[in-house]
Image (spheres, rainbow, N blue to C red):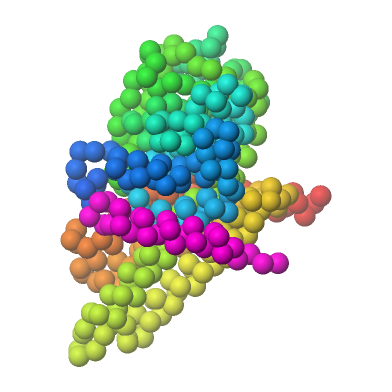
Amino acid sequence: MNFEFSDEQKQLRDEARRFLEAKCPPAAVRAILEGPEPYDAALWKGLAEMGFLGVVIPEQYGGLGLGYLELCVVAEELGRVIAPVPFSSSVFLATEFLLAAGSESQKGAWLPKLASGEAIGTFAYAEGQGQVSPKTIQLQAANGRLTGAKIAVPDGDIADFAVVAARTAPGSDARGVSLFLVDLTAEGVTRMPQETIDPTRSHARIEFRNTPAEPLGGAGEGAPIISRVFDHAAVLTAFEQVGGADRALEMARDYALERMAFGRPIGSFQAIKHMLADMYVSATLARSNGYYGAWALSTDAAELPEAAASARVAATQAFQHCAKNNIQVHGGMGFTWAFDCHLYYRRANLLALGLGSQSQWEDALIERMRRRNAA
């Protein structure tokens, strides 16, 4: 089985890399980290003009109508430059929820705006500390109105709309959770930015007070839709993490070759060699699992649940490992604000929690493999 990308997809990768290296150097990331703007609006506009925001959106809704393999390619390149834009929120989550459960009118209203960059979307899920699941959802939905609060909503301070998980039946049964489409400029919405380890990707607490909401999908169908969309997002995020891991490895390698100690490059010392080798192994393993996940996603294979969890776990481990060791290879300078190592360390830790913790995905992988083996 050939998991390699086609020549056309490699060409797309090269095009995306040239664009992002030109438009998103480390200085652009630092400008968002240190400045008042929540994201790079100019880069976001450029991504829309290149068509990257609408890769999998059908042409009838203003997208390119390509496939998930092409989106994986773009995600990897965005991860390499740790782009300070709401791409994952808008493309991996909001767009996927609309494609999975949206009505024709909902798709017609929002997908063209998502593809053009005119609108930013997100998914509001968590309500408190700890593991998030449909059973922990308590935000209430009744008579087309929402009341309650969501925390740590990615890009919630800048999003135009959100897909919101809310409870439509009392108790903690997952079957009582439904999805709603909410215009975040509507009445009863209050947004408060929240600090995270990576300020280049903003988050917010959103409160809903009798806020009008439109059902997305059928009543009580929220849990299976969330699970499916998260599997898609896990593969796409894995490629973003693989891109970040590879770039962190490259940074460490380059520094090890140019930094001199005791009259020779530090890369010639065995301890540094072993550290770089370990980084390479973890990044390569993550890429291998990512390719498996990309195949399962692009073909809608029955193995997608296991492949998505495998990709998520391996990529999370690799990015955190490479980002941490990149700092170690740089030594004392790696801990300073002047070097870019911390930018990747911040993003690695943020992405590690974005769709649920690593341990949560490890448990999911074990359970999914057990069910498949028992079938």
Spot the residue most to the right. 375
Q: Quadrant of the N terminus?
A: bottom right
Residue stretch in magenta: 1-29
Q: Residue at x 41, y 80 (%)?
A: 274
- Out of 156 and 112, give the one closest to the viewer: 112
Quarter occupied by residue 225 = top right
Q: Position of residue 11 (x, y in %)?
A: 50, 61
Residue 365 visible at all: no
Residue 37 lies in the magenta-colored region: no
Q: Residue at x 38, y 13 (%)?
A: 187
Instruction: Tell me if residue 304 comes above or below residue 161 in the rendering.
Output: below
Residue 19 lies in the magenta-colored region: yes
345 relative to 302 in the view: left or right: left
Instruction: Tell me if residue 7 comes above or below residue 268 in the rendering.
Output: above
Q: Residue at x 39, y 48 (%)?
A: 350
Q: Position of residue 214 (x, y in %)?
A: 53, 17
Spot the residue most to the top. 143
- Out of 359 and 234, give the one closest to the viewer: 234
- Out of 52 and 92, give the one closest to the viewer: 52
Q: Position of residue 312 (x, y in %)?
A: 54, 53
Total label count?
Answer: 0
- Out of 323 and 239, give the one closest to the viewer: 239
Q: Residue at x 46, y 44 (%)?
A: 51
Residue 188 visible at all: yes
Q: Main secondary structure of the magenta part?
A: helix
